[in-house]
Image (tube, rainbow, N blue to C red):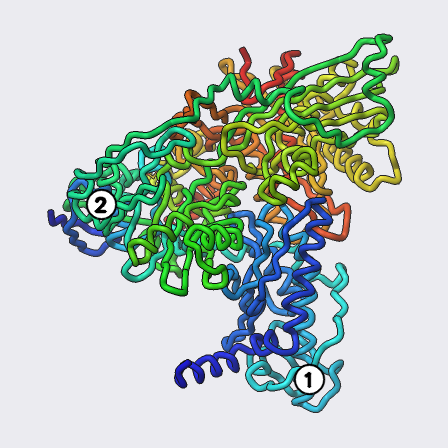
Amino acid sequence: MKIDFKLNGKPTSIDVDPAMPLLWVVRDELKLTATKFGCGMAMCGACTLHIDGEAIRSCSVPVESIAGKNIITLEGLSESEANLHPIQQAWMEEQVPQCGYCQSGFMMAAAKLIKENPNPTDDDIKNGITNICRCGTHPRIIKAIKRAAEINNQNH
Amino acid sequence: MSKEKKSFSRRKFLQRGVIVLGGSVVASYLGCSPMRRFTAQKVESMDLPASISSLKPDFWFEILADNTILLKSPKIEMGQGVWTGLAMMAAEELEVSLDKIKVEHANTGSGLIDNVNTGGSSSTSSLYGPVREVAATMREMLKAAAAKQWNVSISAVKTENGTLSSGGKKATYGEIVASTKEWDEPKTPTLKPKSAFKIIGKEVKRVDLKPKVMGTAKYTLDSELPDMLYAVLVKSPYLDATIKSVDSNEATKSAGVVKIVREGNLLAVVAKSFYAADSAAKKVVVEWNTPNKTQQADLIKLVTVGNGKEANIQKEGSAKSILKDNKTEVFRQEYRTPMATHAQMEVNGAIAHVEANKVLIITGSQGPSQVRDVVAKAIDIKKDTIDVHTPLLGGGFGRKAAPGLAAEAAIISKIVGKPIKVYNSRQHEFQNGVYRPNTHHVLQAKMTKDSKIEAITHDQATPDMYVRNMVGEIGLKLLGSDFLSAGHGASLMYNVPNKSVSVWNTDVPIPISIWRAVGMFPNTFAIESFINELAHKAGKDAIDFRLDMLTDKDDKIIERSRKVLETLIEKSGWETPKADGVGRGIAIGNDRKSIAAAAIEVEIIEGKIKVKKVTNVLDMGQIINPEGIKAQIEGCVMMGISATLYEELTVKDGQIEQAYFSQYPLASLSDVPEILSFLLEGDDVPYGVGEPPLSPIAPAIVGAVLNLTGKALRSLPLRLS
Ligand code: FES
Ligand code: FES
């Protein structure tokens, strides 16, 4: 089945099994590999991306359901390397990643969080994101999200 | 070899100045001695009988035409920051800024790969000398070459930020490399004194930061080969299962399927995409023989002190007879740690391309040279035809010290004749993995009238965690028990006149492996919990009680431990009044010369233990990358909280019961406490940082609960009722 949608701003068309999870469409068919596989069961958040502005675990979304929608992956979060999204800026400043594997999912979830809540408290962050990181970068994730919110508010 | 090919490699040879160096003058220097020294040092530092490789390196460093320096890391980056540490050490002696060093993993076909896995928190410490020596040698060679060209004395040549200069003359390293044909053999250069360090010990950004933030960092699952097919393995959720029968009729008809491969108990669906393979794999009907019937109670019974083979690993004075003398009361407690899994975020995976006389493997492993050996055996091919490339690892924690899926990928690729990518499902990771085994500990002590420990014994029951992998069955027999990995940290460091420690080794019918900090984790939990209980019983402050047993002024470890505890008192506010409802606990460990201690504050909220604040003091000797060390401490705190409060793997009817993250909860953002970290440099050489801060976390939490409630919890994960 042919499905049309927007991926990181670009009109995209794909002809695959409509039940194929979006994660595999993005990674294996469209070769954007920032979005990761961690569990395939919506339990870890490694595959988080944005669908029409919502942070969604793409491993559990059949591609047919995104027809006509706007998908943003980490590759499309920032305008350019020179003009990084506040989340990525803050992630650089706080040196969040260790192994890095979970980070794309965390950044996508975090970008959505600060959009909705421009001044998140520690508790807002702790309750707002349930992604898994095994390296234990959580303390830096909290710092970086608060820093990103700060950058965001300065920019506006 | 065709003419064209020859001239290409000759050109490459000339462009790559350091291959010239590597090929002629420095070959012996680069190739053997630092490697030998490094492995020797590692063996020394770990007290391990290590199997040592004599793999031939192509090169270690390469000065590229754009004046950057390529460092092919023999150690694997799995998040712990080893690339950054090595790059900092090299940049320091090469007199270049850190951004001039590009790091990638060496490959087994041409790299300086060691036969010992990346692990044991030993990479930076073991390479601290060799990397700097090689870098300093390169710098001196560049200076000598420039001096010759400019007709000045070597001492008149200065190096700064990748540029050589003398008077008005100036050239980049790249330029000198390009214009030098013969290199003079340098004397062993003197290394910079600590006071002259410009990079080591300073704040830097980790070298793999940007790709990890931009999403361009490549892991195994992100790698590809042209014309590659995907394989999904069909596995039984039961341990040791073998195939009775297979019905793959439906699966074969599934869209995109290329082949169903069955080779012994290896069953795989090969298809054009992962999704196609995965969908078809669900349609394969298999009947399994499930000979492993292990129950949780069997495991507990097997791993119990008194069972298995005893090896006494520490004996001072006559602890055992004092404990038996019936004169005073013996304080005796038992502790247990559960089986656990690594749950690294990136599942194991591999890509293999098997050709007639050439095998390419791409897999994220902590031991690429072992991957090569396993593949050689699996497809019966000579080792030197195999080239193992290692992308970044999405976490290791010991899980990727096991061979992973390279052999499976190679077998399938050989049968199908195409490059194959294969990876585990999360369920495979949980149920078909290798595990941290459960342990049992019995501690006994007698106190003097003035509340000092007169005699203490520790008996640890544990399966072998790793020694069998290193020295084989016979080696393990000779050693008596695995006191090197599973028994690591079983000994007692305190100055007590009578002490005795034994490790009881039992085999369990479960695949066992190393898990971050290996034996240090269960042993520190048991010993330090016991020490906290003794202090509590004696009505003494937990830190004072320890300081009273750290008295040997001639013992550097003891002296550094004192300093760590004294710093912890000050930094954690140990002596300040506690808020209501708060308990404080502490623990300390000596993990291969790194001394780590934590003071932890807990509360009990709605019947649950909540870690509020963790103050860490770590003396890891020479600081290389302070921010990197702090990140490792934070990671250890989170993993420590996770393993203390939540993690437990159980077995039922020969099946690991937890198959998904939902059944094996891990610490998350909501568990983040306030974390303070303080670094002490008690020595001029760096020791490990990736594991030492982990072990004190569990016993310090237990100590805090004891302090708050008067209740001693002795089994992980902690349960209040
Ligand atoms: S891979 Fe989608 S939530 Fe884990
Ligand atoms: S950085 Fe490794 S899992 Fe999060």
Which residue lies at the image location 24% right of the left edge and 33% below the top edge?
B285
Q: Residues within 10 Å of mark 2 (few under 14, many from 20)?
A: many
Could you classify mark 1 by the number of other residues whose Cα lies within 10 Å: few (under 14), some (14-19), or many (20 or more)? some
Identify the residue at horizontal 58%, vertical 53% (top origin).
B82
Q: Which mark is residue B276?
A: 2
Dot 1 falls on which chain?
B
| Image position of A24 (left or right of A144) | left
Residue B368 in sight from this viewpoint: yes
Which residue: 57% across, 21% down? B302
Q: Which x, y percent locates residue B634?
A: 57, 39
* Residue at the extreme bottom: B151
Q: Amino acid at mark 1?
A: Ser
User: Callout 1: helix, strand or loop?
Assistant: strand
Q: Which residue is mark 1?
A: B166
Q: Nearer the viewer, residue B170 or B416?
A: B416
Q: Quadrant of the N terminus of chain B?
A: bottom left
> Residue B541 at x, y = what percent?
77, 20
What is the secondary structure assignment of the residue under circle 2? helix
**Residue B583 appears at what percent x and percent y?**
64, 19
